[in-house]
Image (cartoon, rainbow, N blue to C red):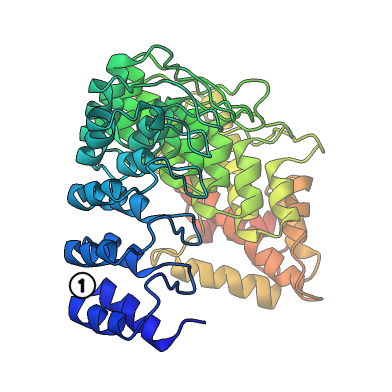
């Protein structure tokens, strides 16, 4: 336990209150007492840069070698704060210049990491302690720590002192990897002037370029590409730079990579195409970006699903709409023999089911239209649920017909008459809300029919009347 006097002594050291410290010292307080984190008054004085308190502690023979629970001694703290005046006093008083903390870091590591240039110069040029330039416990030399933190002046200083290194740490990262991963573009620029192996891989098979993209650092990615990085490199788990940019939702980086002609066709060992990943990430802007770059809209993943299969399974209306409007293939079956329509109905996304059926009917109608010499321009067609005021009246009439007039089997009779396929009828029926489900099924079928009728500019009321008569449902008409 820490005694009250000791706690007060520590606090005085922290607050640069020499009077209190002298009073307590006269009362025989233990000058080397530690708190719960094993820190002494000396630790607090050095960390605060309090020169007069440091002088007082040195004069009264406080211990210099005591390490706190992280293995930090006062000399580490002096390097960290960059206070040269205090550092000289500690060295003169005999502090261990080669002391390491728990992570194997010495004064040079701390100075490099905190951009304390004067401290580095003092140890290397005045004291000539070049053997401090060793890897720490994680295999990082001071040069790597400075690169990781992005200290431009320190990097230049270490290069001038001939301490540049392209060696790797224990994770296989070079200084370039560390600077790129943390988005330090100025450091990346300096390192590139000295660098040989730009496509060096770390233990995960990542290049500096890949790490820059993963971190969302566009400037670094640009610099590394200009310097000749391989844009299409895959990591050990077969991830590409484009893939990671998509998964992290970095739209501007995705656009940048596409502009740099990154490969949009996945390698055989990759499970999903970029478009599949964008759909999985629910990222509409990225999906649009990839489609604008002519990414294959019908690409298959390792389960033979198209992007539409995935969007239908997720039930994302906006994504499905974009894919449908871009003319994706609706007939493709996954490895279980399911179309996107079957996937949507199995996942109980009634809205998506109806959208896909509208699209299927629309494209079939378009084919017929083209076969009869019509033009194939896609007028601004939407497959989403119609909430417009223009169609409100007809929609409520159809609802009334479905809910109050059609008998259980009659909606299907109309569906067959209107050339709904068996698969489409089955997909609508998948939605079950109890014995009266058929009413909602009829309503959905009528709205899908309405969509097609309005697209070819027919009068729905007149058309419905004629079709009901022709289908033998005279009384309803």
Query: Can you give x and y, in whole percent of width and height, for residue 239 in the image?
Result: 58, 30
When the figure is inspected, residue 196 is found, relative to residue 289, above or below; the finding is: above
**Viewer-side residue, 265 vs 407:** 265
Residue 225 vs residue 2: left or right? left
Q: Looking at this view, is 437 or 346 the one in front?
A: 346
Asked if 356 appears above or below 363 in the picture, the reply is below
User: Residue at horizontal 55%, vertical 56%?
Assistant: 450
**How would you rate the neighbour count of disc 1 (Cα within 10 Å): few for under 14, some for 14-19, many for 20 or more?**
many
Please state, as top left, top right, bottom left or bottom right, where the C terminus lies in the image.
bottom right
Marks counted in the figure total 1
Q: Which residue is mark 1?
A: 16
Q: Could you say which is closer to the camera, residue 115 or residue 215?
A: 115
Horizontal relation, residue 110 to residue 281: left or right: left
Side of 466 where 80 appears, left or right: left
Where's residue 17, x and y in %?
20, 77
Query: Would you say residue 275 is visible in this rendering?
Result: yes
Secondary element type, mark 1: loop
Looking at the picture, does residue 188 appear above or below residue 61? above
From the viewer's perspective, tell me whether residue 221 is left or right of residue 385: left
Q: Position of residue 59 (x, y in %)?
A: 25, 63
Coordinates of residue 464 in the picture (x, y in percent): 59, 59
Residue visible at 75% across and 69% down in the picture: 438
Asked whether residue 324 appears in the rendered view, the answer is no
Above or below residue 174? Residue 306 is below
């Amino acid at each position: 336990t820490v005694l009250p006097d000791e706690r007060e002594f520590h606090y005085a050291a922290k607050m640069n209150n020499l009077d209190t410290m002298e009073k307590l010292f006269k009362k025989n307080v233990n000058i080397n007492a530690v708190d719960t984190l094993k820190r002494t008054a000396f630790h607090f004085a050095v960390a605060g840069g309090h020169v007069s308190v440091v002088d007082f502690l040195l004069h009264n023979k406080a211990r210099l070698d005591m390490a706190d629970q992280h293995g930090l001694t006062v000399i580490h703290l002096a390097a960290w704060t960059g206070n040269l005046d205090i550092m000289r006093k500690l060295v003169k008083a005999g502090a261990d210049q080669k002391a390491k903390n728990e992570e194997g870091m010495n004064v040079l590591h701390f100075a490099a990491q905190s951009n304390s240039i004067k401290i580095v110069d003092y140890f290397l040029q005045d004291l000539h302690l070049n053997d401090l330039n060793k890897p720490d416990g994680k295999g990082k030399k001071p040069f790597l720590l400075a690169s990781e933190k992005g200290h431009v002046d320190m990097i230049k200083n270490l290069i001038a002192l001939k301490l540049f290194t392209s060696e790797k740490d224990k994770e296989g990262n070079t200084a370039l990897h560390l600077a790129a991963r943390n988005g330090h573009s100025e450091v990346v620029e300096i390192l590139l002037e000295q660098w040989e192996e730009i496509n060096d891989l770390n233990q995960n098979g990542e290049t500096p370029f890949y790490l820059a993209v993963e971190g969302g650092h566009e400037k670094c990615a640009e610099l590394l590409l200009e310097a000749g990085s391989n844009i299409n490199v895959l990591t050990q788990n077969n991830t590409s730079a484009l893939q990671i940019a998509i998964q992290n939702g970095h739209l501007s980086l995705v656009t940048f990579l596409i502009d740099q002609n990154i490969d949009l066709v996945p390698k055989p060992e990759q499970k999903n195409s970029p478009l599949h990943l964008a759909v999985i990430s629910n990222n509409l802007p990225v999906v649009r970006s990839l489609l604008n770059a002519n990414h294959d809209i019908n690409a298959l993943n390792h389960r033979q699903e198209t992007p539409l299969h995935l969007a239908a399974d997720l039930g994302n209306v906006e994504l499905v709409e974009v894919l449908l409007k871009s003319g994706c293939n609706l007939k493709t079956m996954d490895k279980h023999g399911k179309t996107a329509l079957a996937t949507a109905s199995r996942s109980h996304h009634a809205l998506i089911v109806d959208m896909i059926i509208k699209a299927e009917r629309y494209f079939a109608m378009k084919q017929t239209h083209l076969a009869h010499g019509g033009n194939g321009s896609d007028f601004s067609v939407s497959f989403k649920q119609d909430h417009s005021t223009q169609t409100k009246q007809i929609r409520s009439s159809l609802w009334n017909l479905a809910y109050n007039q059609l008998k259980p089997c009659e909606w299907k009779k109309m569906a067959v008459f209107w050339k709904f396929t068996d698969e489409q009828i089955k997909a609508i029926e998948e939605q079950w809300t109890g014995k009266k489900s058929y009413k909602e099924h009829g309503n959905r079928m009528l709205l899908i029919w309405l969509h097609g009728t309005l697209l070819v500019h027919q009068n729905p009321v007149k058309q419905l009347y004629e079709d009901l008569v022709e289908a033998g449902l005279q009384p309803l008409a």
